[in-house]
Structures are given as structure tokens and as C-alpha cells.
Amino acid sequence: MTSAPLSKSMPLKTKLSHTAVFWIGFCVVMALLIVAPLVLPEYWRRFLTEILIWGLLAMSSDILIGYTGMVSFGHSAFFGLGMYGAAAALLIVSPPNLWLAILFGLGGAAGAALFVAYFSTRLRDIYFAITTLIFSQIFYVIIFTWTEVTGGENGLIFSRPHFTIPFLYDTRFSTATLHWFVLSVVAGSYVLLRRIMQSPFGMVLQSIRENEARTRAIGYPVERYKIVAVMLSGLFAGLAGVLYAVQNQFAAAEFVFFTTSGDTVIFNVMGGIGTLVSFASCCRAFSAISSPISSRSA
């Protein structure tokens, strides 16, 4: 009589234990990242901040690769348009406004993601990947050749905005405060995306990944879910682009080139797709080897 209740309680206990372990680990990592700027020299603070930004880009890509089963080579476009959207706001508005830069960057990335999603989600597998690659190269050519607006191969240079809370607070970013701001955005994005991927919407995306035909057969509008997934992914990729622009005070066409998308896919493959934290194992190496901004700002 007593064995049945015990056997039923064990899975619940295990589930709670796994959840507790996750949040304990999350809090420990957050604590280390919060303390890091206080003990690291200037260069390593910037370096760690840049890793977090590339990690956010990898997270955005994992929504499609890991949870929806769609390999995208269009994230360089979303990342770059987020960067140029922020640059436009910072150059047009005086004094530069951080929140307006974020709004412009997210708007540019979301518009591009909607445009790309409308056409590319009609295709599957390698055809979807090739279509996103084509669109990313179209955006790259436009940005590279439209010199009067984008600066072409020279890019755009602008001043970093202050961190402001309207009518309450206004201060310049230091490397430490910028790190904490980026950390809060990346951590908040991770918690939000984790919750979304565990929601019914996320479960449908994973169903599409496992068997798209069966998901469609039971009544889910697969194409609509794919469009929303691409837009969500593009939105967070654009947010990463905004943060990169704010940190480095620079926007360049090279970040819209398809190699940025290729690096993002490699992040997920090396670290493990479908985890949202797969960037942790490889972002450091990428930042050290591939980022021209890091070496210039050291």
C-alpha cells in the first residue's frame, strides 16, 4: 500500500532537484560575472563583455537550429542591421540616447527578420539555409555599396550614449558599468528564451523539428510558427548587434557578411544545439581569433 505513493513522489523530487541545481548554478555563474569587472584589468573586462554579446547572438541562432531544426545563415543580416539601426539613432539624435538606439536596432532587425521569414519559411532543410544565406548577402551588398548612408567598407563611428533613466539617473558608461548592463540584458534574454522554449509555443517548435509533417497533420499552422520563430530569433540577434555597436562605438559591413552567420552556427554545433548556452565552450576562442574590434580596442 505504501509503495505506490513513494514511487509517484520520486519523479517530482527529482524534477525539483534538477530545477534547484539549475538555479543554483545560474546564480553562481551570475555572481562570478558580476564580480569579474572588479578584479579584471581593462582589456579583459571588454573581452568578457564581448563574449557575452557573441553569446547572445549564439542564443538567438539556437532558437532555429536547436529548437526548430532550421539551419539559418541569415543571422549576420539581423546582427548587422541591429548594429546599423543603433548607429543611425546615435548619429541622428543629439545627445545620443541608449534606449532609442535599442529601439532603432530592434526595429531594423525585426523588419529584416519578417521579410526573410515570409519567403524562406516556405522552404525546408538545405533550401531554407540557402535562402537565408542569399538574403544575408543581399543585405551585405546593399550596406557595402550604399556608402553615403552606411559608410561602405569604412563603416560608421559614433559616440557611446550615456546610461539614463529618464528624470532619475544619467551617467557615462565605464567598462565595468557597460559590462553589468550587457550582462543584465544577456541574462534576462536567456531566462526569457528558456521560458519561451519550455512553453507550449516552444513545444510546438520542437515538434516541428522532430516531425514537421505530423505536426501539420494534427492541426498546427507550421508556417506561422516558423515565421514567429525566425522573427524571435532575428530580434535577439539584432539586440546582440545593438550591444556590440554600443560597446565598440563602430558599425561595419564586415559583420553583415555570411561568415558571421557561419561562426554562429559553429558556436551551436561545438557547444551542443538546443541548450541556449552552447556558446560558452567556443565564444572565447572566437573573440580572441576573429574579432577585429577586440584587437583594436585592447
Image: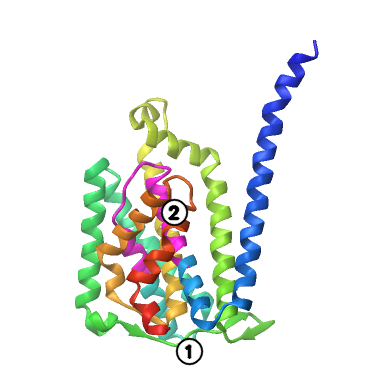
Residue 231 point in image, percent of width and height: 40, 54
Question: Would you identify the image quadrant in which residue 261 lies?
Answer: bottom left
- The kind of residue tagged 1 is Ser
Q: Residue at x 27, y 73 (%)?
A: 254
Does residue 124 appear to the left or right of 206 in the view shown? left
Q: Earlier in the sequence, mark 1 or mark 2?
A: 1
Residue 186 point in image, percent of width and height: 53, 63
Count of labels in the image: 2
Q: Nearer the viewer, residue 97 or 80?
A: 80
Residue 70 point in image, percent of width and height: 33, 44
Tell me the element at label 1. loop
Neighbours of disc 1 within 10 Å: few (<14), some (14-19), many (20+): few
Quadrant in which the N terminus is drawn: top right
Tell me the element at label 2. helix
Question: Would you identify the image quadrant in which residue 151 lies?
Answer: bottom left
Q: Is residue 127 above or below residue 45?
A: above
Residue 67 point in image, percent of width and height: 43, 43
Residue 221 appears in the rendering: no
Report the magenta residues as a range: 53-81
The residue identified by callout 1 is 94
Q: Residue at x 31, y 52 (%)?
A: 72
Question: Would you identify the image quadrant in which residue 220 lies?
Answer: top left
Does residue 292 appear to the left or right of 16 in the view shown? left
Q: Residue at x 67, y 33 (%)?
A: 14
Q: Is residue 24 above or below residue 109?
A: above
The residue identified by callout 2 is 232
Q: In the image as oriented, which residue stretches furthest toward the right? A: 2
- The kind of residue tagged 2 is Leu
Magenta segment's dominant SS is helix
Q: Nearer the viewer, residue 126 or 101?
A: 126
